[in-house]
Image (cartoon, rainbow, N blue to C red):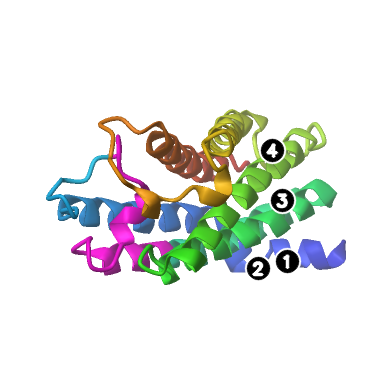
Amino acid sequence: MKRIERARELPPLKQFHWFGIAGSILMLAGIVVSMLTYVGTEGERFSPLNHFISELGHVGVSRLAGVFNVGLVAAGILYLPFTLGLGAVLGGWWAAAGTLAGVVADVAVACVGVFPMNNLPPHYAAAMTYFRSGLLTVLLFGVAIQRQRTGHEEIDRRANIASLAAVLAYAVFLVWIEIQPGGASDFHAGLIVARPTLWPSAILEWSILSAMVAWFVVVGACRRR
């Protein structure tokens, strides 16, 4: 316990919420910049309604794929102190489990940028690792936030509104791809044959991004001390 108390006072962990915000800003900046210049193999412009996020990092297709991929790597690195700091201030077994899942998710985010879509097998493995560990992260931290002792809350329990939204976004996406033909093992953007005008799978993936960024910002903003 004394080690945990000392860890809470380390500057990077004490100000952990700023790392989550900074990581989200860098990632969103990379997404927006690469999206504005994107032209697909069919000459189409990028649309969140029928393009997957990772397509922005497809080297040889996306004009500024490097910007997107660097943004993901930077975000994954910056999310690490957020995850460690949140686990330290909450304490307990639920937070420890959330920290472990969060570290895996953070590394997976960076790996999605290190292995873009043109290197599909490791890219797909990193992306699916992120989706699954991301679900565990927000779920376990949500329980830890809810189980704080009354009068000793480090994170306002109202932050769990964002936790619930994130859990739903991850869960719906993962269930959706499992019920597709071939299941999750055959699910990735590299198998595109005919791109529909509205692609539920892509839209659900974008809902994860929105819920994830909201979770980082809301949980950080709801820190009480």
Question: Do the residues bearing badges 3 and 1 touch, measured as CB atoms within 8 Å?
Answer: no
In the image, which is nearer the foreground, mark 2 or mark 3? Answer: 3
Tag 2 residue: 10
Which range of residues does the magenta coloring cover? 48-72
Using the image, determine if residue 121 lies above or below residue 37.
below
Q: Nearer the viewer, residue 126 or 22?
A: 126
The mark total stands at 4
How far apart are the alpha carbons under marks 3 and 1?
17 Å
The quadrant in which residue 146 appears is: top right
Choose the circle earlier in sequence order: 4 or 2. Answer: 2
Task: Tell me if I can see residue 15 in this picture.
Answer: no
Tag 1 residue: 7
Residue 169 at x, y percent in the picture: 53, 34
Choose the circle earlier in sequence order: 2 or 3. Answer: 2
Does 89 sit left or right of 206 as displayed?
Answer: right
Question: Do the residues bearing badges 1 and 2 touch, measured as CB atoms within 8 Å?
Answer: yes
Image point (44%, 41%), residue name = 205
In the image, which is nearer the foreground, mark 4 or mark 2? Answer: 4
Q: What's the residue type where badge 1 is placed?
A: Ala
The quadrant in which residue 60 appears is: bottom left
The quadrant in which residue 162 appears is: top right
Tag 4 residue: 142
